[in-house]
Amino acid sequence: MKKEELFGFIGAFLGWVFDSMDATIYALVMVSALKELLKNQGILNTESNVGFYGGLIFSIFLIGWAIGGVSFGYVADKIGRVRALAITIGLYSIFTGLSSLAQNIWELGLFRFITAIGIGGEWAGGATLVAEIFKNKNRVFASSLLQSAWAFGFLLASIIYFTVGRYHSWRVMFLIGVVPALLAFVFRLFVKESQEWILNKNTFSYIKSLKLLFRKEYVNQTIIGSLLAFVAVFGLWGVTNWTPALISYILHKKDIAYYVGLGSIALNIGALFGYISFGVITKHIGIRNTFILFFMGSFLMGLTTFLYVKSFDKLLISLALLGFFNNGVFSGFSIYFPQAYPSFIRAT
């Protein structure tokens, strides 16, 4: 592996690790955070109210993610993958840290919205950078391995919650999330820009790029890819945000922090194997059949986990299998999208 490939991959990988960590923190502290903030606003902090406002903030987060993906896709095509990545890492880190200062649910919602813009934007630049710096024979494996960073980030958040968060205020968890901002500065110092982007940067036009996405030769992959990504993101965050509530429902305990940590770890151990396996399976049966396999597995395990599992021991096994399929499918997007478009519209 060349120095350029190594530094580029490590930079994008760590960016995605901390991206995942900051995204996951909310799911782990949602109940405790909203109970305090709702009480501060004079709103009854019942389970139904926590669920309603928690889902509302989650929806706001997803909107920010979508906006970040589109807007920083443009930025990455315009100013380069490396600079765009540094900006997004700084953005999601700083606003995760600011979430610790929220005094009401609307402030928390605003901070999570801006955090999501950075999180959504980071993937667009990182996946594109890795796809461009690796040669064709290594690209599928590198892209699949890059996606596994999400599982490491999720595990990191779970371990921090398991060892620190459950003993301290939810605000401490968000404050820890500011640490990755340091990576943004290191990233700019050591990671070089993609040569493929440098060669094609003068051909970039945002309006032209948007039109190209829907031209005859690209419209099928644009529509199909967007629909698949929508379903995958919806499934990912549905599972991530409601797993703590499921654990609480199964155990009927007030203090579930320990068990939520175990559940998150099980989910992401499965996800880690899923991310890496997607690329390996793709080499044998093709990306289309691999997508079908993972989406079907995700659907079946989602039904099993949320409708039929009634004991915590079985839930841990079910969560691991669900993580394998439900999270693992995201490796397919970092393989599929970069190959589907030319360099000057790839991040867009």
Image (tube, grey):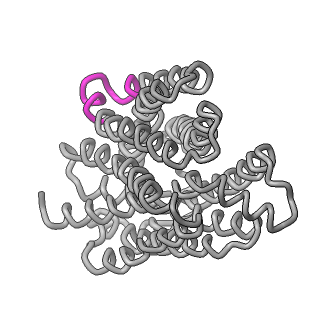
| Residue at (75% x, 64% y) in the render | 37
Q: Is residue 123 magenta?
A: no
Q: Is residue 243 left or right of residue 53?
A: left
Residue 301 vs residue 12, the one in the foreground = 301
Where residue 241 appears, x then y in whole percent?
Answer: 60, 45
Rendered position, 288 above or below 331: above
Magenta-colored span? 279-290
Of residues 283 and 325, the one nearer the viewer is 325
Q: Residue at x 39, y 67 (%)?
A: 81
- Tally of marks: 0
Above or below for 185 versus 70: below
Residue 141 point in image, percent of width and height:
24, 43
Foreground pick, 179 / 69: 179
Can residue 19 be seen in the rendering of this structure? yes
**Residue 110 % position (x, y):** 70, 68
Judge left or right: residue 92 versus residue 181.
Answer: right
**Drawn side of residue 293 relative to residue 105, left or right:** left
Q: Main secondary structure of the magenta part?
A: helix
Name the residue rendered at 26%, 62% in the picture.
10
Residue 226 in sight from this viewpoint: no
As drawn, the residue found furthest toward the left would be: 1
Left or right, 165 with reference to 47: left
Q: Is residue 283 magenta?
A: yes
Q: Residue at x 76, y 45 (%)?
A: 47
Q: Dividing the image into 4 quarters, which one contains the N terminus?
A: bottom left
The image shows residue 210 at horizontal and vertical percentages of 57, 55
